[in-house]
Amino acid sequence: MQSIFYERARDVNHAIDLAREPGTKFIGGGTNLLDLYKSGIEKPLRLVDVSRLALAGIEELPDGGLRIGAMATNTAVGTDPLVRQRYRVLSEALLNGATTQLRNMATVGGNLLQRTRCYYFTDPAFARCNKRDPGSGCDAIDGHNRIHAILGASEQCIATHPSDMAVALAALDAIVHLQGPDGERQVPAADFHRLPEDHPEVDTVIRPGELITAVELSPMPFARHSHYLKVRDRASYAFALVSVAAVVDLDGGSVRDLRIVLGGVAHKPWRALDAESILRGQAPGAELLARAGAAAVAGAHGYRDNAFKVELAQRAVVRALQTVIRKSGGQV
Ligand code: SF4
């Protein structure tokens, strides 16, 4: 077995200094990285432990938003009173993910950086996976692809991103804060993950040596009226076949503003902009919701085992919107 250099970082600058060496990975909760290391998929030469950095706080910002440290656990964020009250969709997404034990270890930063659960990626016994071994091919396209993408896939990869939290963050217009060798920068959560295109081995826009330090939520008063609907094969400890993060601002009987983001259907959280346009400024009746559901899956393509996800996603969008609208006192 290959030995690994391990060091615990004292602070963010120390972590970034240590990560200048090639082959370095940051480790927080380790819930995904260690699994992938044990199966030989991740092969870090150096691990820099960032789990004890002072990045676990959840602070209210002067403008009413929230800053969530990257080392905050999924449990801490999902059960935080302000998150539950103001950003319900985020709390629901987190508490629907994994198991209690995993949520107690998994961090916000690690959640964003987790890898796909495509069977052919996670099991090195399969030879062809462009994400694991670029240029080798993709066994999923003609293989077992029940959990795979129906939107935004490429000829190189049809994997989905497994994070529930990332779907909710995209619906909340969250901002990811990064710090690396070239300083600090911010990336909208909706743009943090990328589509596979010709480089499925690259999951996100993070640069070498960069560390996620926080996620910021701007004030979005209507996010009190939000919902995360997760459809999966069993009631717990399962990834989404399809999920929907819905946030709706009702003004009287009309939709003033909204966000619809789908999970489990693409290599990144999939924002349904056309569906949002259909509803914005309108009174959301059954016919309009059905049109929005159809628009959310426009251009979807099913494979051998997952064509059912196209209609499932369409129906999930309608149900998620109905739930939020009814909870907001509206009628559908
Ligand atoms: Fe690999 Fe992507 Fe194909 Fe899965 S879908 S086998 S992750 S290339």
Image (tube, helix red, strand yellow):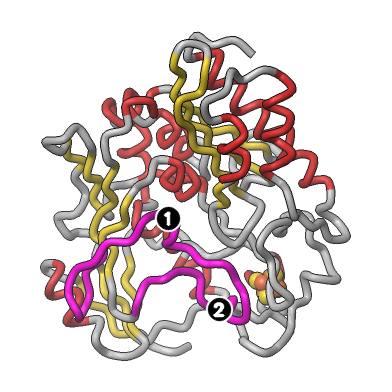
Say which label, 1 or 2, has the lower sequence index.
1
Name the residue located 61 percent from the left edge and 20 percent from the top edge.
284
Of marks 1 and 2, the one in the foreground: 2
Q: Is residue 211 visible?
A: yes
- Quadrant in which residue 53 is drawn: bottom left
Q: Which residues are magenta?
A: 178-207
What residue is at 34 percent from the left and 77 percent from the top?
A: 207
| Image quadrant in which the C terminus is located | top right
Residue 201: image tag? 2
Secondary element at image label 1:
helix
Is 243 on the left-hand or right-hand side of 184?
right
* Depth order, front residue of 73/191: 191
Establish if 139 lies above or below 248. Answer: below
Name the amino acid, label 1.
Answer: Asn
Let me know if residue 102 appears in the view. Answer: no
Determine which of the numbered discs, if any, sits on residue 111 in the image. Answer: 1
Against 138, residue 90 (above or below) is above
Magenta stretch: includes residue 112: no
Left or right of 217 on screen, residue 250: right
For ligand 1, give the image quadrant.
Answer: bottom right
The residue sitting at 20% across, 77% down in the picture is 16
Q: Quadrant of residue 65?
A: top left
Q: Amino acid at mark 2?
A: Glu
Across and down, in percent, residue 307 comes to: 84, 51
